[in-house]
Image (cartoon, rainbow, N blue to C red):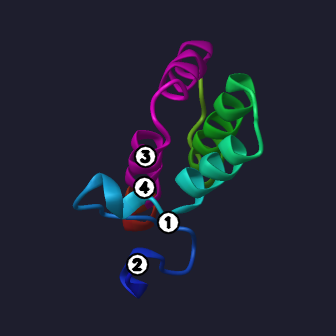
Amino acid sequence: MSSQRRPAGGVYGPYETQRDTFGEPLPAAVAALHRSGATRAQVGDIKRNHLHEALDAAGVRLSAYDRGIVDWLACWEPEVVQVVTGWISRANRAT
């Protein structure tokens, strides 16, 4: 990863390919969980927490419906969730 991918403040991306996300925090954490024999629920929890941390850092208030969408997004592959959190962090940094 280049230094441009991880500036201070936890801003991630942009990503040109799925492979670009592999060394980032979420995909790396999920890979470690898989190696340790974690359950599907544990993997979902870490993806959900990653999204909530990005949203909280950006000051985004969530409704019950919004939280349901976060739960739905947490079912996607970690690389997808990493890209979404990258969008959030980059948008927050731009404001």
For the point 45% across and 35% down, the residue is 77
Can you give x and y, in whole percent of width and height, for residue 46 in the image?
69, 40
Amino acid type, mark 2: Met
Residue labelled with disc 1: 23
Q: Secondary structure at mark 3?
A: helix
Question: Could you say which disc has been placed on residue 86 in the image?
Answer: 4
In which image quadrant can residue 43 be found? top right
Q: Nearer the viewer, residue 81 or 53?
A: 81
Q: Nearer the viewer, residue 40 or 92?
A: 40
For the point 60% across and 34% down, the residue is 61
**Nearest to viewer (mark 4 / mark 2):** 2
User: Gap between marks 3 and 4, in whole Å?
Assistant: 10 Å
Q: Reply yes or no: does residue 76 show up in magenta.
A: yes
Q: Nearer the viewer, residue 93 or 40?
A: 40
Q: Are marks 2 and 1 in contact (CB under 8 Å)?
A: yes
Is 56 placed above or below 70 here? below
How many other residues sit within 10 Å of disc 3, few (<14), some (14-19) or many (≥20)? Answer: many
User: Gap between marks 1 and 3, in whole Å?
Assistant: 10 Å
Residue labelled with disc 2: 1
Q: Are marks 3 and 4 in contact (CB under 8 Å)?
A: no
Segment tinted magenta in the rendering = 63-89
